[in-house]
Amino acid sequence: MRTSLFLLGSLFLTACELVSSTPPSSSTSSSTGSGGAGGDGGSGGGGNGGSGGGFSLDCSPKPAPELPPEAFCARVAPGAPGARPLPVDLSAAHAGVRFFGPVDEYADADQALAAALLPADGLEALDLAPYAGALPGITCALPANVAASSLDVARVDIVDGDVALVRPGAGPVEVPPEVTAIVVDLRGLPPAPGLREALDVAVAEALAAPVPRLARRVRRHYGMTDEQFTPTNLYKNTIAEVDDDPIPAASSAERKLALLTSERLAPEAASLALSLRLAGRATIVGEGLRADVAEARWQGIGPTGITYRIADLILPDGRRVPDTIPADRRMAEPACIVHEIEGLAAPAPITPLPAERPEQKSVSPFNKRQPPEVDLGTARAALVVAHGAARTFFPYFDVVPDVIDERLVETLGTLGQTPPERPVVRNLLRRFGNALDDSHTLVRDYVTKPAGSFPSYLEWIDGEAVVRQTLAVGVEPGDTLVSIDGVPAADWYTTELARSSGATDAYRFVVASYEVQQLQKPIELGLRDPDGGMKTLQFQPQPLADFGAVGFTPTLRPAGWLADLGAPKLYYINLTGEILYDMADFNAALTEAGAADGLILDMRGFPGVNLAEVAQRVIPGPWSGAIFRVAMRTGPDDVTIDEFADTFGPLESPSYGGPLVLLVGNGTLSAAEHFSLALVDANRATVVGRGTAGTDGNITGVQLPGQFALSFTGLEIRHADAQKSVFHGVGIIPDIEVTLSAAAFRDGVDPELDAAIDHLLAAP
């Protein structure tokens, strides 16, 4: 980095030493009494050093101090130790670096974390120096300051009758009206809660008009930019320029102002000093200022912590603030400026040099998979990154129990200190994801591919997995899984449900069942038929194509009249993508259904056509879609909610306005539920079937160390009713709940479809 130096003076500078004769006052104080050190002048008989009510000044020539190191990490003051479990504070710090720091790629931060967590005792004896070393100019690892959790009480001392020496802190700052100059001591102030307010109060007494703070460029997130599924969707990150509230004024007249600085400054103190100095409103006495310090924030992590940059400070002309702004005066004891401030000229204008520190930028993280190697550091980092992404962007912690902090501690504890295998890491990530209670939450392992499948569509009936449709050799519809690889099915599902996520118990079963539907090896299955007959099957994995051919819906019945089911005047349309994927085919079917006495739309699978258009053709009037709520984070602290809903009008030719039944089931998820919400909130259909997955809204995913990925819902969806009712975890509740049975599956009966027919035929 380029270093700017001027006004260093001679090798020997006038210096003075502040000698405390009594401890600092416990409250705001003003001292003007006699008894100071001998000399000429000074209020109350104090010599060349003013007030005698609590301290004395002894100024004598001293050698100039050595220049401090020109390095970010040597110039920033550390804050308090971590207050939460170490992994939770580590996650918060890393999420701040990853999502808001000036990194080129998210993986740069993730891989630095994995390296830091590699030692067996990497959590118990956390050493973040390698982490900071891998991210130069972005973060620093420092021992925490146990005294930095709070501010001392503010103090004011009057020197020479008309100069106030102010130490910012808690409480008010009162400056007598005869004071004409103020010296504010920024040295040693900790980055504690309330520091910004304390600084504002301290300098406000010198200002007759507010002073603009420097603007900041920060990363803005509209939801979490998807790293897994698609490069372009609703979510994005950009760079935003943000104006801050001005530094307030509290004086009736402008007073001269000097700021005392030291080698290390708290970020808020450095930021205030830069704003005042660059505005020409304060003289800097002590050490120069660094922009990176002013752009940083602290996160305590156990007995240590990190400071990391979250912004670029911006000059009024749009250029970045120079990396360094030199002090106007360097003194062995900067407090001696109290005797010279009245004669100081206004600070000279700064000629900015180009900034060279890492610059804030938007990140394009889609499909940027991280190295596939798995070790202890990778596994730990994957869990920490997953937690940080969920804590920052998951929108439903006001709806679901917030237990992810405890789950992070649990999963890291389960991992222990032994290098893990890939399946262990995947299952621990699944266990973490379970805490989100989100039907979009899945763990992807890019390295391990299934050897084959158990191609069966399973339903959850009274706590058991029952085969509804199957292409599995030796398996029949209506068979119930009673054991899986020698483990009783109830016990097997207890294990898998605890590491599967779902907003409803029914959909959690769907996710858990993937573990038997996609196989790595042959498996032993115990089966019971509807009549109670038992068999054991040594099942060989079948091609994955067979699993796809079974479908992700209870039936692959195509659109058409229902004469074969005794309802020749009723029409059925299956909206699942395996059957219907062209709007022209839907329009043709809807045209044919025009004369029907009733229409059944089957949304038990995942759609393949434009469901907004489908809804417009069956809802005869204007209607509102579900309410979207997207969190926009401008920097790590400023969060606003963008709430909106789309409105639609009816479409004609074709359209259908007659009696309508909507079929839903436990597998109705996401876009399928969004369509169902439209019909329900428009009071357009009778809903028949079983409760849905309870999860709507655009999905997003985070890439993790070891070539894993974790997905979750990235925005909140609410009903379009007056109450904006909660949808997540509730789902679509059928008007007619249908009970399923193994015998019905054996006999080829579709109970939900039969119930829909019965309802329409019974209508007047």
Image (tube, grey):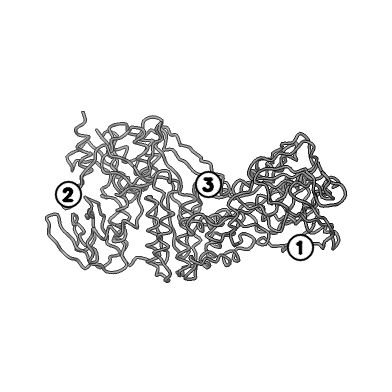
Q: On the image, which quarter does residue 173 sit in?
A: top right
Distance from the alpha carbon under mark 1 to that under mark 3:
43 Å
Residue displayed at 75% across by 49% down? 259
User: Looking at numbered disc 3 in the image, what kind of residue is underneath it?
Assistant: Tyr
Instruction: Report the residue marked by disc 2.
Output: 744
Where residue 279 sits in the image (x, y, percent)?
Answer: 76, 45
- Mark 1, Cα crowd under 10 Å, few <14 / some 14-19 / many 20+, is few
Q: On the image, which quarter does residue 660 sit in?
A: top left
Instruction: Report the residue marked by disc 1.
Output: 67
Of discs 1 and 2, which sits in the foreground? 1
List the single residue furthest toward the front. 35
Tell me the element at label 2: helix
Residue 279 appearing in the image: no
Q: Front-most of 538 and 334?
A: 334
Q: In the picture shown, does residue 484 fall above or below 440?
A: below
Residue displayed at 29% across by 57% down? 513
In the rendered image, the quadrant that contains the C terminus is top left
Where residue 546 sits in the image (x, y, percent)?
Answer: 29, 60
Q: In the picture shown, does residue 351 fall above or below 73?
A: above
Residue 222: assigned label: 3
Tell me the element at label 1: loop
Of discs 1 and 3, which sits in the foreground? 1
N-term mark: 1 or 2: 1
Q: Is residue 239 left or right of residue 86?
A: right
Where residue 712 sits in the image (x, y, percent)?
Answer: 42, 52
Q: Front-most of 531 and 641?
A: 641
Q: Front-most of 274 and 165?
A: 165
Distance from the alpha carbon under mark 2 to that under mark 3:
47 Å
